[in-house]
Image: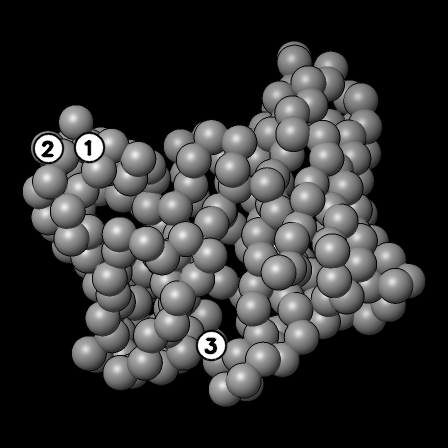
Amino acid sequence: GQQVMQIPQYQHVQEGEDFTTYCNSSTTLSNIQWYKQRPGGHPVFLIQLVKSGEVKKQKRLTFQFGEAKKNSSLHITATQTTDVGTYFCAGRGPLVSGGYQKVTFGTGTKLQVIP
Amino acid sequence: NAGVTQTPKFRVLKTGQSMTLLCAQDMNHEYMYWYRQDPGMGLRLIHYSVGEGTTAKGEVPDGYNVSRLKKQNFLLGLESAAPSQTSVYFCASCRGGANQPQHFGDGTRLSIL
């Protein structure tokens, strides 16, 4: 079945340093979404990538979708304490019977920012 | 606008007891999901529904049942609770279609003793 792995599992950075998390799927994806979960909170949608090679930016966050649509990355420039949380990717697979496209969440990367 | 509401927020059960977790959304979303979140495991899909009256198994369905009698509600039942079901449970919903984001509830923290 479809598997989505994320690395690293944990990352501690000094405030101001950059951070990157990588997402890899065992199958080609239709699209990929990124979510952020603050400590004690629930996942919140950040962005969606659909096209091969797509790059999107949200302020200090840069999201990329691989050419083969099997991997993605999230890069944060100059981290701040407000970036603390767990970042999840969620890959949407091909159509299955009934028209539903399975969504598989990655294992997440927990980011800790040291002030 | 409440979004996705989960009840209860916390619950402690004894092994063998049963209970139902309720998820309600007021966004008229077609799709609803139940996930469990365990340390280091990410979000694992238990069951999902693509519309009123329909349900389907996800990645880890054993020991759980679901019902979607009304479009706005998605119920998750534990038939006979086991310590392995201690987890944080999240409900999510989204519009139908391929490119829609999921909206999550605040979660239910469930402990089975």
Q: Earlier in the sequence, mark 3 or mark 2?
A: 2
User: Is B29 displayed left or right of A15 in the figure?
Assistant: left
Q: Earlier in the sequence, mark 2 or mark 1?
A: 2
**Alpha-carbon distance for marks 1 and 3?**
33 Å
Subunit of mark 1? B
Identify the residue under disc 2: B14
- Mark 1–mark 3 CB contact (< 8 Å): no
Identify the residue under disc 3: B95
Q: Relative to B30, is B78 above or below?
A: above
Label 1, secondary structure: give it.
strand
Image location of residue A57, percent across then percent down: 79, 53
**Alpha-carbon distance for marks 2 and 1?**
5 Å
Q: Relative to A10, is B103 above or below?
A: below
Asked whether residue B40 is in view, the answer is yes
Camera-side residue of B70 and A82 = B70
Identify the residue under disc 1: B112
Subunit of mark 2? B
Q: Relative to A62, is B57 above or below?
A: below
